[in-house]
Amino acid sequence: MENYFLNLEAIHPSCLVKILQGNKLPKNGEIWEFTNEIKPLDLYCYLYAKYGPPNGMQNFLRSDDSDNLIHWEWTLAGEYGLTSIQGQNFRSEVHLIGDFKGKGITLESFISQIKSDIGNHGKKISELRKELEKWTQFVNPYQRIESAVNLHFNKLDELKLNPQEDKVPQATSHEEWATYQERWSTVSEKYSYAVGLAFGLRSMLPVLAESFVNLLLFILCRADIKSNERLFKNTIRQPIDVRIQSLHVSCIGFDSAVDYSSEECKKFHTLMNERNDLLHGNVEINKLSIGDVFFNKRVPLFIQYEDFWDKSIGVSMRSVKFEAIHEDKKIVDDFIKYILSKLDANIKKQVELIMEKGQLGFNHKTGRIGLLFPEHMVDFRAVFKKV
């Protein structure tokens, strides 16, 4: 029917319960799914403008937060039965309950009719949209880097490296030479992967600590600084040591100043300098040294002999300070714990909660930061058995 969905009427929830309990509707029905043919925001505002607040039963079963299977539902009555329209996490659904079979009613006609009618309610829709809070979802950079760091460490630990046991000694017999290349290739591939992981970790660990400092500035920065774009940009663009030492000045919630001469901060500062050398490719001979050798004109004179392992895999492992990578992680963890210890207890709890979330929300109008959705996402579908 050309205008069937434009002539539906909202019914009171109590009447809906009586209808469903009275078993007065035919058992057959249909479920349609669609995504952005009508954008969920537009559909919600249109239904609200035309029919008032959501009246479907699912709306009264939802919890008062964003962690729901069904976020809103309107149930409307028409000539052939009930039409329920639901907003879920990944799609909109239309549930038809009644005698709709053979009536020529389709999802395409539903979408077409709704689109044609939206303009008739433009004023109410505009008024409603002005009352809505707009939040911008964004990725938590600290959590993103921490997840990558943890993944790298997990992969590294899975390799179960043991240089003493894994070392492939120089072949000294025909039998050893027969399998030497295969054994060396296997071990070399394993340790090359480990060196790559360690290089990535040495690059990321100081960034993890810096992203924590930047997150603190974004969350706790004083309103008079954050509201002034030039002041705020100047604050977050300061050298990292200046940002850290002025946290108690730039931010709210600090019970005391950060002591940059503390052991936690000194070790972090050293780690940051090493990371800068690593990423910028700085040529620091003392830091890059892997050993000395003498020459008599063109004749090399070794201080001591090293085997093939020492001159290849061993060099790579030393170049990324592989043996200290877990200690570097502890340095970052201790630094973050130290900074958090300077916060008011209630502020600290809020910051730690935000640190754990992969996605956050920001309200540009109020400047508020929010946890908009749970880390998990849920979905479901009704499955009908064919008769």
Image: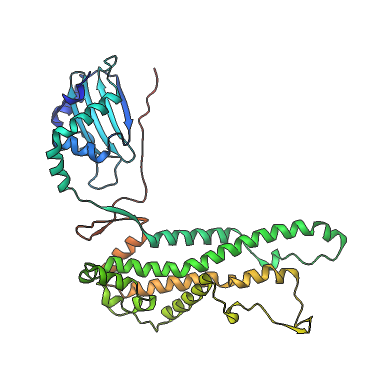
Q: Determine whether, in the image, residue 243 is placed left or right of residue 117.
A: right
Asked whether 333 or 319 is in front, the reply is 319
Answer with the quarter of the image where residue 174 lies: bottom right
Answer with the quarter of the image where residue 292 lies: bottom right
The residue shown at (49%, 69%) is 329
Above or below, 77 against 376 in this view is above
Percent position of residue 37, x then y: 30, 34
The residue shown at (36%, 33%) is 381
Answer with the quarter of the image where residue 385 lies: top left
**Quadrant placement of the N terminus:** top left
Residue 254 seen by the camera = no
Residue 315 seen by the camera = yes
Above or below, 98 against 70 in this view is above
Percent position of residue 50, x then y: 14, 33
Asked whether 358 or 330 is in front, the reply is 358
Above or below, 292 against 321 in this view is below
**Quadrant placement of the C terminus:** top left
